[in-house]
Each structure stands twice: as C-alpha cells, then as structure tokens.
Image: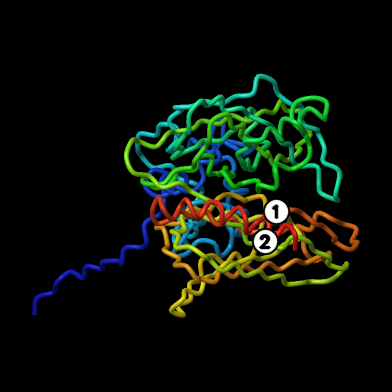
Amino acid sequence: MIALPLILVGAAGPSQPTWCDDIRPIVEARCVRCHQPGGPAPFHLTTYEDVAKRRAFIGAVVESGTMPPALSGEIGAHVAGAAAMTEQERRHLQDWIASGAPKGDCEDPPLKAATGSARPDVGLRLDKSWTMPTEGGRNWGRRTRDKRTFVVPTGAREPLRVQAMTVTSTAPEAVHAITLAADTQGRGRWMDEREEGVGYRMIGDVGFSPSGVSGGSGVGARTLRLPMGFHWAIEPATDLVAEVHFRPDGIAHELSPRIDLELAPEGPSRAIRTLTSMVRSVNVPEGVVEELQDELVLEHDVDLVALTPRANGVCTSLSVSATLPDGTNLDLIDIDDWDPHWRRPLLLRKSIRLPAGTSVRSRWTLANTEGNTRNPFIPLEPYTAAMRTGVVAWLLHVAAVDEADDALLEPWARRQIMNRQRS
C-alpha cells in the first residue's frame, strides 16, 4: 500500500469588488452626469476619494432608492435614457462599501460624463442676471415661488431647424428644470416689462402656448437631442421664453439661462408639433385623493417622438396610453411615483406611428393629503387651480408623416388646445 499525501483544495470565494474593476464604471454611468463640476448636484463624485469619503451616505441613498434619480415606472420599452441602477450594480456597490472601499490597481483619471452637448450653432444668452431668493414662499395662485420666466430673443432672420438644444444656467446646482415656449407675438416681453427687474414670476405659457412646447431640459439631462430627421421649428423674430424651475438653498445665486441650439443638417427633416392632453381646472378637497382623466382623438397620422409630463407635487402618479383604430393598446408611459423635481422631456427610443383615429388617454392621481410627502400645500386646504394649458397635462411631441400633412396638423393642433381652453 502506498500512502499518498492528501491535498485539500478550497473552493474560491467570490472576488471582492474594487473601485477600479467594479465601482468606477457604475459611478461613471449612473452618477457623474449630475455630480461633476457645472452639474446640478451639490457635490462631486469624479474621483475615488470623492466617492470613498461619502460611501456611507451613498450606500444609504442607494439602498433607499433615492439615488440615482429615476421616475418610478417611466423606464420601459419606450423611453430612452434610463438612469436607474440595476440590482446587480446596487449589490456590487453595497458589497464594496461593506468591505472597506478597496481601490484596486488602475490608472484613475477624474471621471467626466459624456454630456452630448448641442453644438452652439446659435448661442443665446441674457445680458443680465436675476438674483434668486434665498428661501421659497408663496405667490399668485397658491403656487410655490420656485419659478422665474425669462425672455431670450433669438435674433433669427430666417427659420431655424433645431435638432438639439442644451439648456443650462449660471447656477446649475440651484436649477432642476428649464422648459421653453416659442413666442412670435412679443407677449413675453410685455409680461417682462410689467415687472421690475429681469424676467417675471408668472409661468411661461405665452399666448396660451404651453411651457415645454418647444423642448427643455431637466436634472441630469441638460441636452435634448431629437433623432435624425426631426427638428423644432423656430420662426424668424421669435423669442424663446424660458421657464426656470429653481430650488432656493439659502444662497442668493445670480441666475440666468443659457441656450445653445444645434441646427439640423441640410436635407429632409420633419417639424415637431406639440399636442396637449390636459385637465384645465381642478378642485380637490383637503384630505382627498382624486383621479383625473382626459381623452384626445387624433385627426391626423403622426409619429410620436417624445412626451413631457406636467404636474406639481399634489400629483402622485400619471400615465398616458393609446388605443389604435384597429384596437391595439399601447401603454406608453406609466409613472407610479411622480416627483416633479425630475421633470424633463421623455424621448422615446423609437418614434411610434399613431394613425388618425387613435385615442390617447391620460390619467393623473392628485393626493391633497398630508400623507403625500411632496404636497407643497401644507397645512391642507382645498386645492383649487385653473390654467389655460392645463393644471395637469401631457405634451405629446409629434411629427406629421409628410409635408402636406404637416400643413394640416399644425393648425389642427392649435385649434384643439384653443377648444380645450374654452371648456
């Protein structure tokens, strides 16, 4: 008998995540677009040291789902630009934090998110700035004092076909959204002249054209880029009216918007028109949860390119769906936990053809309750509001299928919102 030595081979355990191999790519993909110099976040996460020293806080907000910000339910088959962290990424991050945040071995230049900023073919600036209040408050119509509207002349002498826009401000950390409307009648200037200082406090629905009808930006998405073959149509001698949603943080920021417009290349391109599904007036008693609905039946074939939700913090959820003439149902977007802080245009992964006769159905849930932690109107009282372009609304950014149809779509879109303003 020959005795052989017994060799015990232990099973290899799971590898320990490191900054270089596992965490740096997650931070680059999910965090840096806001947490970088010039971004809207209050601190930077561009280096290992930045992340490691805040790892306990980062672990808590990731575990709670507070960060990275994503509207719950919006990311699905149709919406592009998902920012939600995957469960695997969350586990890697929490395991890394629990193991003491090892760095690993790699070249480690500061992270910088690819912004995809618009090429400044047309750069628009305000000559003067406005001093943001250090604290919030109430103003007209029971709306919180978190908006300021600025008139930004384009100076254009010929039509502009805008494919991409980057909308920022001089105080990015204090601004969470900027929405635009094109003004060809000088009504924004008239409003501006009525109030002392730069801009005015009433919202930017110029001539009853909805704020956001001409695009805009939100936190983490300062650039809106339409797919090739589509553009925003800006007529000559137009003012862009920029509604800036800001958040007072105790600092008197000097605030003014900056808008860079990238023009579409020569060749065929379809103009984006905006259809509005809305509820013009609401009256929700204190302590009551109420569901509102709207239906819009299309009279023309269109391609749906993007949607913009409009609702304040009284709204807790909202959705939009479509039923095609052949009975096919499309669930376009369903946001089951609405946070207006993350408002932005939602660009679709691929345009969706909606034939004439399609029924577009919208739904909003309003919770005028103390349990609604985003309700801006505490102590409770009846929530009563009316607005020409909707207290709650979905803006549907669409394009006609060809130039002949566009000549019919544009006036129909204008008539349908005028009819809703009268109802």
Q: Position of residue 324 (x, y in %)?
A: 47, 74
**CA gap, disc 1 and disc 2:** 7 Å
- Which residue lies at the image location 75% right of the left edge and 37% below the top edge? 249
Horizontal side, residue 78 vs residue 310: left or right = left
Q: Position of residue 189 (x, y in %)?
A: 72, 30
Q: Which mark is residue 75?
A: none
- Which residue lies at the image location 75% right of the left edge and 57% below the top edge? 374
The amino acid sitting under disc 1 is Thr
- Which residue lies at the image location 64% right of the left edge and 65% below the top edge? 318
Quadrant of the image for the N terminus? bottom left
- Residue 83 seen in render: no
Q: Which residue is mark 2?
A: 278
Q: Secondary structure at mark 2?
A: strand
- Marks 1 and 2 close (CB-CB < 8 Å): yes
- Which residue lies at the image location 42% right of the left edge and 34% below the top edge? 263
Q: Which residue is mark 1?
A: 389
Decide: few, some or many residues near mark 1? Use Cα within 10 Å; few <14, some 14-19, many ≥20: many
Q: Position of residue 319 (x, y in %)?
A: 60, 67
The one of 63 and 53 positioned closer to us in this rendering = 63
